[in-house]
Image (cartoon, rainbow, N blue to C red):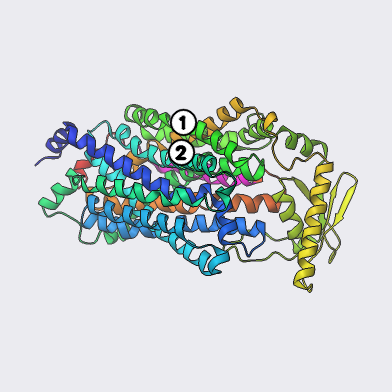
């Protein structure tokens, strides 16, 4: 049977095939919902499961547990990508959804640190690892499955619905969290946070039913009938330089930049509102939800447009727009505009009363805490951590060797400390006193402890957040179709899954932790943006030079 005959056959899609594509997307929404509950509730989970640590380290530890689900995703891509190319897309879907849904439910009933001690965070991270493995096998299968059902010339449009699922999953998680907050009130941080995790068992039941009703991909079924399936998809995908070269180009010329733009626009923006600008969580979630609601249709708009003008121009344009408007201290700096409209008092305080930290620079370290267990004990690191957690920008000045750090704000000067050699009770008392003195100096200097709801320009903040989401839709909307079109059917699941999950799992998933460490190191609340700027710029250059347009590729000829 010829490739053209197969293409024509797939073009005449039946209502059942369209239903299957819808079902695939819906199941994937539920899986993303499960995955992003943790990210949305990282601060609360940090208190529940890492309460034995200081607040700043607990939050970083919570983010690292969140990132653990991302770090392991490429391994899930290898395991389930191989299964998807060996036994089929449908059965792999069933396995991934069961692992994801079960792990999410267990998080909801897992005893906290106060109940079972260190076992709580250990089990929690193990569950996050299982979720990461499951998601590592989900996306490549969903994108491949839908693309292999789509008519030639409409793959961008059809796969763009899969691209909406991550955003819709995040949106659904935010709505459930908001509703639960309203119902449980002050008990939300005690036990109410568990409800969104527990109700996921209902979504699991729906998802399993949906996956059981799906038919196998026609392209995979044809290859199975013709006995052309790969016997060693991983070896063919990554042991063959011809294919490995495409994998590397896909990673560094497409996915890495897409990942940092995605996480900056949809996850870091929430982190920025709540942790940097101190907007209360309910308001921040509503603002993000509004932006997602307005921006999500653009996934389909840009996916459909990519069928006409190409995938590459849209993705590269999205990267370029993000790079230019992320850069701090420019008239079009989008995060500075968010600060101006969400917490103008903080902006005014940073301009009117800049702070300095004078310290022995040899004791100042880069505060990237990969495990969340490291204690920062130098006076410089402690001063920087306290200032960063209070969203106070500062300049670091070199002080005499061996001297304690000193924080200066206006005419107020506060000497730092080091807990080295102190009794635990004395160290704790010193920590409390130092943090209190810093907060009092910041209050006197006009630095608000929280954003004033009356000062927030809600329409403008939603507009700015929507622009960030639109950048996401530009880089993400067409990319599923492009990744599918890069690889042959027999190894497509494996080949596209790995670069996607390395890019999104490592470059994207670690973004919040890296940006926090960069801010603490440099002292400027916008300095963390240089991480996504740098990665997106490198991807833009590599993509422009080495990535070829794929919209006219006949994927049925690439067996």
For label 2, count other residues whose C-alpha is less than 10 Å away and answer few (under 14), some (14-19) or many (20+).
many
Is residue 532 on the magenta stretch? yes
Pick whichever, 248 or 143, lies toward us: 143
For label 1, count other residues whose C-alpha is less than 10 Å away and answer few (under 14), some (14-19) or many (20+).
some
In the displayed structure, does residue 86 sit left or right of residue 138? left
Which label number is shown at residue 293?
1
Give the vertical position of 54 relative to 218 (above or below): below
Q: Which residue is mark 2?
A: 171
Q: Position of residue 81 (x, y in %)?
A: 30, 55
Question: Split into 4 quadrants, where in the image is the N terminus?
Answer: top left
Q: Position of residue 233 (x, y in %)?
A: 26, 58
What span is in magenta?
A: 528-550
Residue at image position (36%, 32%) is 303
Pick whichever, 417 or 436, lies toward us: 436
Tag 1 and tag 2, C-beta contact below 8 Å: yes
Is residue 433 on the magenta stretch? no
Residue at image position (75%, 34%) is 345
Q: Position of residue 250 (x, y in %)?
A: 39, 47
Q: Residue furthest right?
A: 411
Q: CA distance from mark 1 to mark 2?
A: 8 Å
Residue 234 appearing in the image: yes
Determine which quarter of the picture holds residue 55. Answer: bottom right
The residue tagged with tag 2: helix, strand or loop? helix
In the displayed structure, does residue 411 sit left or right of residue 237? right
The residue tagged with tag 1: helix, strand or loop? helix
Residue at image position (43%, 50%) is 35
Pick whichever, 535 or 17, lies toward us: 17
Pick whichever, 189 or 218, lies toward us: 189
Give the vertical position of 228 relative to 472 (above or below): below
């Amino acid at each position: 049977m010829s490739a053209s005959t197969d293409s024509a056959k797939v073009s005449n899609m039946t209502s059942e095939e369209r239903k299957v594509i819808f079902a695939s997307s819906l199941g994937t929404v539920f899986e993303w919902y499960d995955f992003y509950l943790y990210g949305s509730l990282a601060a609360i989970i940090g208190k529940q499961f890492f309460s034995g640590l200081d607040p700043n380290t607990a939050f970083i530890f919570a983010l690292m547990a969140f990132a653990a689900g991302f770090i392991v995703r490429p391994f899930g891509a290898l395991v389930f990508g191989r299964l998807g190319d060996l036994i089929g897309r449908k059965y792999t879907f069933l396995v991934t959804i069961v692992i994801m849904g079960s792990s999410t439910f267990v998080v909801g009933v897992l005893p906290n640190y106060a109940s079972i001690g260190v076992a709580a965070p250990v089990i929690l991270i193990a569950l996050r690892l299982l979720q990461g493995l499951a998601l590592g096998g989900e996306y490549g299968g969903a994108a491949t499955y839908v693309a292999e059902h789509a008519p030639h010339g409409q793959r961008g449009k059809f796969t763009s619905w899969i691209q909406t699922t991550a955003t819709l999953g995040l949106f659904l998680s935010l709505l459930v969290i908001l509703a639960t907050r309203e119902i449980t009130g002050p008990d939300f941080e005690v036990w109410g946070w568990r409800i969104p995790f527990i109700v996921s068992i209902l979504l699991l039941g729906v998802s399993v039913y949906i996956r059981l009703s799906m038919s196998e991909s026609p392209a995979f079924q044809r290859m199975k009938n013709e006995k052309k399936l790969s016997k060693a998809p991983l070896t063919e995908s990554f042991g063959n330089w011809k294919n490995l070269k495409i994998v590397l180009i896909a990673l560094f010329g497409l996915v890495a930049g897409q990942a940092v733009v995605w996480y900056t626009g949809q996850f870091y923006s929430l982190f920025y509102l709540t942790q940097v600008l101190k907007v209360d969580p309910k308001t921040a979630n509503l603002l993000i939800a509004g932006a997602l609601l307005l921006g999500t249709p653009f996934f389909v708009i840009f996916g459909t447009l990519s069928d006409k003008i190409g995938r590459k121009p849209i993705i590269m344009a999205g990267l370029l727009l993000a790079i230019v408007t992320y850069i701090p201290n420019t008239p079009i700096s989008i995060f500075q505009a968010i600060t101006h409209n969400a917490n103008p008092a903080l902006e005014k305080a940073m301009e009117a009363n800049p702070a300095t930290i004078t310290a022995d620079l040899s004791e100042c370290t880069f505060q990237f805490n990969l495990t969340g267990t490291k204690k920062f004990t130098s006076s410089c690191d402690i001063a920087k951590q306290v200032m960063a957690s209070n969203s106070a920008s500062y300049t670091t000045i070199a002080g005499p060797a061996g001297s304690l750090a000193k924080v200066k704000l206006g005419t107020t000067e506060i000497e730092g400390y080091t807990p080295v050699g102190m009794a635990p009770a004395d160290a704790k008392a010193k920590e409390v006193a130092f943090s209190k003195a810093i907060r009092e100096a910041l209050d006197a200097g006009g630095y608000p402890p929280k954003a004033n709801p009356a000062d927030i320009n809600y329409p403008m903040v939603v507009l700015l957040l929507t622009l960030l989401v639109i950048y996401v839709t530009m880089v993400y909307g067409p990319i599923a179709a492009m990744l599918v079109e890069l690889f042959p059917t027999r190894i497509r699941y494996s080949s596209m899954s790995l670069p996607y999950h390395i890019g999104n799992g490592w470059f994207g998933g670690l973004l919040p932790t890296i940006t926090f460490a960069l801010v603490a190191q440099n002292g400027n609340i916008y300095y963390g943006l240089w991480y996504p700027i740098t990665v997106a710029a490198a991807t833009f250059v590599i993509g422009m030079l080495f990535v070829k347009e794929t919209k006219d590729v006949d994927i049925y000829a690439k067996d």
